[in-house]
Amino acid sequence: LTATVTNNTGSTITGMELRGAIVDSDGSLVRDRTVVVIPARQTVLEPDEAMNVRVLIEKVDPDSERGHISLEVTALRVG
C-alpha cells in the first residue's frame, strides 16, 4: 500500500505509526501490518511537508477475497 501523507497539524510530527489492512467483502480481516514511519524512515515531518509512505503486506493468500484496502494513522506524536 502506498500513500502520500501531508502534515496539516501546524506542528512538527516526531512520531507516526500506520496500519495497512486488507478486508474481505464481509469486513473480515484478511491481513494487516503496522509500521512506524517516523522516526524509522524519516526523523520528523515538518508542518505542510509531505512524504510518500509504503506499507508492505506479505503472505496474502492469492485466493483470498479483497473487498477493501485501507491505510490509517494509528499513532501520532507532535513536538
Image (cartoon, rainbow, N blue to C red):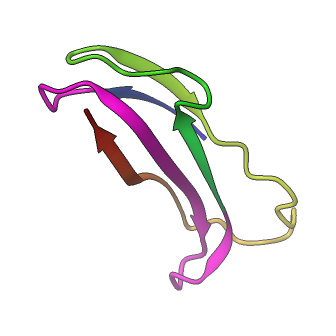
Q: Is residue 52 magenta?
A: no
Q: Residue at x 87, y 60 (%)?
A: 59
| Residue 61 drawn at (x, y percent) | 86, 67
Quadrant where the C terminus lies?
Answer: top left
| Residue 74 drawn at (x, y percent) | 41, 57
Numbered range of the magenta stretch: 7-32
Q: Residue at x 58, y 61 (%)?
A: 21
Q: Give the camera-side residue of 66 and 47.
A: 47
Q: Give the camera-side residue of 55 and 11.
A: 11
Q: Give the camera-side residue of 3 and 49.
A: 49
Quadrant where the N terminus lies?
Answer: top right
In this rendering, the answer to whether 16 lies above or below 79 is: below
Left or right: 72 in relation to 19: left
Q: Residue at x 34, y 47 (%)?
A: 76
Q: Residue furthest left?
A: 10
Q: Residue at x 62, y 77 (%)?
A: 29
Left or right: 45 in relation to 11: right
Q: How many circles with numbers are drawn on the protein?
A: 0
In this rendering, the answer to whether 46 lies above or below 53 is: above
| Residue 13 drawn at (x, y percent) | 32, 30
In this rendering, the answer to whether 77 lies above or below 70 is: above
Left or right: 49 in relation to 52: left
| Residue 65 drawn at (x, y percent) | 70, 71
Within the image, what quadrant is residue 34 found in? bottom right
Within the image, what quadrant is residue 64 found in? bottom right
